[in-house]
Image (cartoon, rainbow, N blue to C red):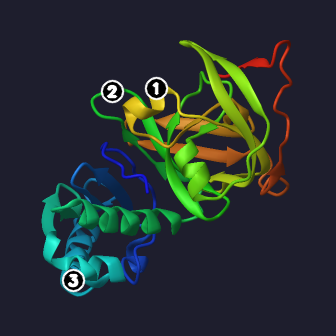
Amino acid sequence: MKLLSATGVAVFLTLVGSLNALADMSLKRIRFEADGGAIEVEAKRVNDTRTRDAVRQRLRHDLREQFPSATPAMQEHRNRIKYKYQETTRGGRIRIIAKDHAALAAVQEFLRSQMTQAVKAKAVTFNFIGETSLVSLPVTINDRGTFLFLLDTGASRTILSSAAADRLAIPKGRNMTMLTASGGLAVSLRTLESLQVANARLSDVEIGVADPPLMRALHVDGILGSDYLRRFKVTIDYDNEVVDIEPYDEVDSVSIHVNDFEEPDSGGVTSLIR
């Protein structure tokens, strides 16, 4: 199981059994941290004190009644998991802190499950990776798992880590060497049933499975490249930490079939990143 140790992922979500009535007026985020993570909810509008207060009340209720018993694994490790409520300017957050490796795995698996239940909207919130200007997004693969991807508009191809591919039991394809900024990279080409960010979905997608140093350094599961992004209208709002991804034709582009990985020009080598 891959544990996320970097801060960074924010996504619209539907919390289990809570906050549904506030969905239209609030912004919900999940954050992965080195010692666990957080669920954060805030009013969309700065001066909306009514929603702010309702969010805080709901989070305090969920802290007492729901989160400690959210999953069997979290119940099993309840003595090694600490919960902390914090108020923010427009709402609040619940920090979930794990005291050992097994508890951390339980906490982050729970947070992943919340990501998988993300609202199918055209916008998704993001986090900056560390102190950089780099952006990470939650990406759902084969409707079975949600993973952190670096959003890289300069990357020509999308990559998935080998650990994530193995976790989803994605059949191996042919091997190739791809060119990156740092040299050749051994890649296994594999076909995904689907790849989706918010409601922007592609089907039958051939991607590269590899573990470039950049992904390991940033603690992400993949790189979302232009082979995906070019099929949608993408707007990045850095001030509000939101990416708007909208199909060009929302009627006909709910599911787009793609299988156009370019054949190498020579010697089994093709371009991957910049």
Q: Residues within 10 Å of mark 3 (few under 14, many from 20)?
A: few
Mark drawn on residue 61: 3
Amino acid type at circle 2 is Thr
Mark 2 and mark 1: span between their CA atoms?
A: 17 Å
Q: Earlier in the sequence, mark 3 or mark 1?
A: 3
Residue 72 place in picture, x, y as percent: 35, 83
Left or right: 237 as drawn, with respect to 105: right
x, y (%) of residue 129? 35, 35
Nearer to us of marks 3 and 1 is 1
Residue type marked 1 = Pro
Outermost residue to the bottom: 65
Q: Secondary structure at mark 2?
A: loop
Task: Tell me: 150 left or right of 57.
Answer: right
User: Can I make out residue 39 in this image?
Assistant: yes
- Residue 46, image x and y in percent? 27, 53
Which residue: 59% across, 26% down? 153
Query: Residue 254, relative to residue 134: is it above or below?
Result: below
**Residue type at tag 3:** His
The residue lying toward the viewer, choosing from 82 and 92, is: 82
Say the numbered circle drawn on residue 52. Answer: none
Q: Earlier in the sequence, mark 2 or mark 3?
A: 3
2 or 3: mark nearer the eye = 2
* Disc 3 element: helix
Is the residue 262 above or below the residue 14 in the image? above
- Residue 44, picture quadrant: bottom left
Say if mark 2 contacts mark 1, CB within 8 Å. no
Q: Which residue is mark 1?
A: 213
Q: Which residue is mark 2?
A: 132
Q: Is residue 146 above or below residue 219?
A: below
